[in-house]
Image (cartoon, grey):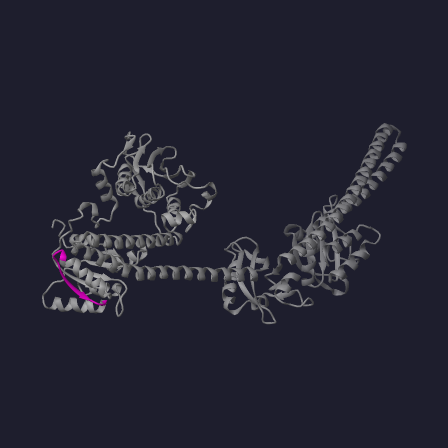
Amino acid sequence: MNLAEMLEWIASLATLETRHEKAEQFARVLGIDHLIVFAEDTDVDQLLPIAGFPQTLPDGQTWQTFLRACRKSARHTATLCYPVRDQSWNASGISIGSLVIVLLGDPQAAAKACDLIQRTHRGWELFAYGVAGELASAKAARHALDARDAAEQSRRLLLSLDSARRELQDAVVAADQEIERRRIAEAEVSRLLLAEKQFSRLLAENEARLRLAARAAGFGTYYGDVQANQVSLSREFMQLLGLPADHNDTIRLKRLLSAVHRDDRDRVARKMDQSLDPSGNGEFQDEHRIVRPDGSVRWVMMRGSTVFAGDPPARHPSHIAGVAMDITERHRYEEQLKTARHAAEAANEAKSQFLANMSHEIRTPMTAILGFTELLNSRLQSREDKACLETIKANGDHLCEILNDILDLAKIEAGKVDVRRQPHRVAALINHVHTLLSGRAAEKGLEFHVQYDGPIPDLIWTDVKMLRQILINLVGNAIKFTDQGEVRIVVRCHTQPTRLEIAVMDTGIGIPPDDFATVFTPFEQLDNSATRQHGGTGLGLAITRRLVDLLGGTIDVESEVNKGSTFRFTVPTETLPHDQSSPTPATATPATSAASINSATSEDANPNHVSQDDQTADEMPGISGRILAVDDSRDIRFLVQAFVRAAGGEILSATNGSEGIQKWRSYRDKGIPIDAILMDMQMPVMDGITATKQLRDQGFQGPIIALTANALSRDQQRCLDAGYSDFLTKPIDRRELLAKLSHWLGNDAT
């Protein structure tokens, strides 16, 4: 029976003449033997039967005790004996307003009927209101009778005529008022019944909308009785489980759990048990698989709550309710995303491995080309021959710059560049870049100036390597694309928030406005003529843009064709608390503060790095000691031998890591120390990482310097983690090699 039918039965009890008959019919519809409705009579302080069971009631005291128990606990059950044919009945009672509704018969049917009555309590309250009106009418009738009796007595009693008349008038007024109240009550009952019908209609419409939404969204609902171990499923939930439309919509909880995939069943059962725990919050949520009768598997998201009854410690689960949604498509999409992410990560790793291999394959022969060029240059005397070798070296260096640009861009795009901020002197960095590139500007006959607009802080907190590379890229481009005029660096500092602004200005070929959008795009050149005339890969500005982004800054360009360009970037900085901004000269020349330049480079470089500026072109660091060079390339071994011997050291060689370990052991066993080892990373038989770890494990404590063609920072970190002391990136620079050996061997003063 639905709520609308229940309300119609309640309305049928409003007719006094058929009330008992309707109550008996109502009882049969509910599946019980009898239904008796009691109403409270305030005059006699008792509950009087107004509908139902016409037979003689049991002992009045016993009956009133049962009714009072119903009023106290809202719902009450007991077994009552009747004097008619020694019958006994199972009685269940429920109190609603001024009514007590008693159900005689099967306890389970009575419990379900009580649930329906409780859900339609509003209709019963309206019915109680009408019954109250009836009782009031009866009372009014009695009052009217009393009034007539009083009038008759007043006529008989002449002495009390005035008093009797007044009483009669009062009684008539009271009767009229009671009649008016009854009329108002009946009108209110009618209005409420109409509202109830409208509410039922709206409720039915909302239920239809909910079913429509459930079908559209793919979710179903469930409602279960924990004590009865049963759960009712909506049609949508049954479709989700793959059950036919004519299947019973009420199943046992175990049957619902048996539909869960066996790999998920234990977890779902554990969560269900937790949601039924009276000490918990009763919430249930899980995503799991279900297996339909046809064997197909669907992913389901279930979410529900438990309704508890009673107070601790008697608190216990009463009902459960919730929703279930088909998330198979979402889960499939998530799996596809996961697969795509793994594929992207694998592709990224493959790209990194390719870059490492490419770096190794290019840098290894470039080491031989540049190294032997430098070695041969030191042995030749002819200026023409030396000029040819300088051409070879210049082009080799250019190839290395291109390779470095490609690797830098790859590292930035892969997110493998970390910003490492540290204190640094602004003026020293600017002067260092000025000194580094002033020779290139002088070769083209360009003026190269540094200009400070206003005071700047002495120290700032930033990643100085990134800032230096940005400046070198922008100034290098300005010099390359300017044939006459000047290149100028303009520096200013802004406050609130604190940020450093640097502009690189030139009087070069300029950039058309249409190319502003692509000037920072990798591998983009302005036009083919510029490419042919000036060369380059088109990566410098792309790398610059990404470095500025990493520092949290911005960069833009202003340009006019054949008049010049201005690249202006700002980066956020934090001035150190003890610093004071001080005025700086408006211009600086190439001779500006050589001491501050040396100070700047020493702060930013690797603590083990010796700057080339500290040595003149004709001076090379001297070394003393026995060096073991381990590299599978014969050319690299020969080149290192030549460099070390020329610097005064003794050199040994091995072709792979295993051979290097054996050679060190043999010399150690003879009591002949090996002072340092130069170890390649990628070699056959045994690579340098493995060899270095074994050397450290076996007691070698001297410096091990990696000869690596991998310029990625993660590969350099792998060297240090494996036990390397330092690393040299191929192609090997002669001065840097000797400087590192001199440092680690303690020959810095040599």
Q: Quadrant of residue 215?
A: bottom right
**Tag count:** 0
What percent of the width, then of the height, locates residue 278? 52, 56
Q: Is residue 320 visible?
A: no
Residue 63: quadrant of the picture: bottom right
Residue 650 falls within the magenta-colored stretch: yes
Question: Residue 519 appears at what percent x and percent y?
Answer: 43, 45
Give the answer, above or below, for where 147 lies relative to 627: above
Residue at screen point 16% across, 60% down: 642
Which image quadrant: the N terminus? bottom right
Q: Position of residue 522 (x, y in %)?
A: 41, 50
578 over 108 or under it: above or below: above
Q: In the picture provided, is 16 more to the left or to the right than 566? A: right
Locate residue 436 relative to residue 133 in the image: left or right: left
**Residue 268 percent across, percent down from the top left:** 52, 63
Q: Residue furthest left?
A: 671
Residue segment shown in magenta: 646-656
Of 332 and 502, the residue lying toward us: 502
Q: For residue 281: magenta?
A: no
Front position in the image: 120 or 25: 120
What residue appears at the point 81 percent right and 42 percent down from the top-left corner? Answer: 137
Q: Is residue 465 above or below residue 273?
A: above
